[in-house]
Amino acid sequence: MTQEQIIEAVEKMTVLELNTLVKTIEEKWGVSATAVAAAGPAAGGAAAEEKSEFNVELTSFGEQKIAVIKIVKEVLALGLSEAKTMVESAPVLMKADVKKEDAEAWKKKIEDVGGKVTLK
């Protein structure tokens, strides 16, 4: 299978399928997708720019799991079962490269009902 075929297959996956794939890769090779994403590109000599896009990670659903599921379902336009599976898989990457305003709004909504979100 070529790299292009793999990318095409991944692009067609649902959020639930992607989540399962990432967990399988993490277990098989003992790596963490979170650690890889946090490492980012190698630091260059250029001055750091303010980030305009963030990876939104649901770190905990707190005591109001149903309220968090409803918010995740709404903001990501997921089906109920996909949103439930994602929330129950916390900590989990909800979405990568989200505009700063949207990421902060999602974080506020989820934290207002007792969940925890990390923007990376």
Image (cartoon, grey):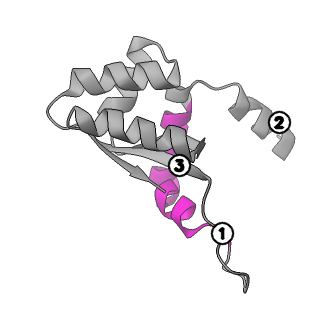
Read off the magenta span: 18-41
Residue carrying label 3 = 55
From this view, report whether residue 53 is shown above or below residue 36. Answer: above
Q: Position of residue 120 (x, y in %)?
A: 49, 57
Dot 1 corresponds to which residue?
A: 49
Q: Which residue is drawn at 30% across and 31% down?
A: 88
Tell me, yes or no, whether the highlighted magenta stretch contains residue 35.
yes
Residue type, numbered disc 3: Asn
Identity of the residue drawn at 44% across and 44% down: 104
Tell whether position 20 is magenta: yes
Most distant residue in the left direction: 63
Q: Name the secondary structure under disc 2.
A: helix
Is 76 positioned to the left or the right of 108 in the image? right
Residue 64 at x, y percent in the picture: 18, 28
- Name the residue that disc number 2 marks: 5
Indicate whether 20 appears above or below 56: above
How far apart, in angstroms, are the residues tagged by discs 2 and 1? 34 Å
The CA span between labels 2 and 3 is: 25 Å
Q: At 51% from the left edge and 25% from the top edge, which residue is drawn? A: 76
Residue 72: x, y in percent? 40, 26
Displayed quadrant of residue 83: top left
Point out the tag, 1 or 3, that comes first from the N-terminus: 1
- List x then y, in percent, for residue 14: 58, 24
**Of the image marks 2 and 3, the number of the one nearer the N terminus:** 2
Neighbour class for label 2 at 10 Å: few (<14), some, many (≥20)? few
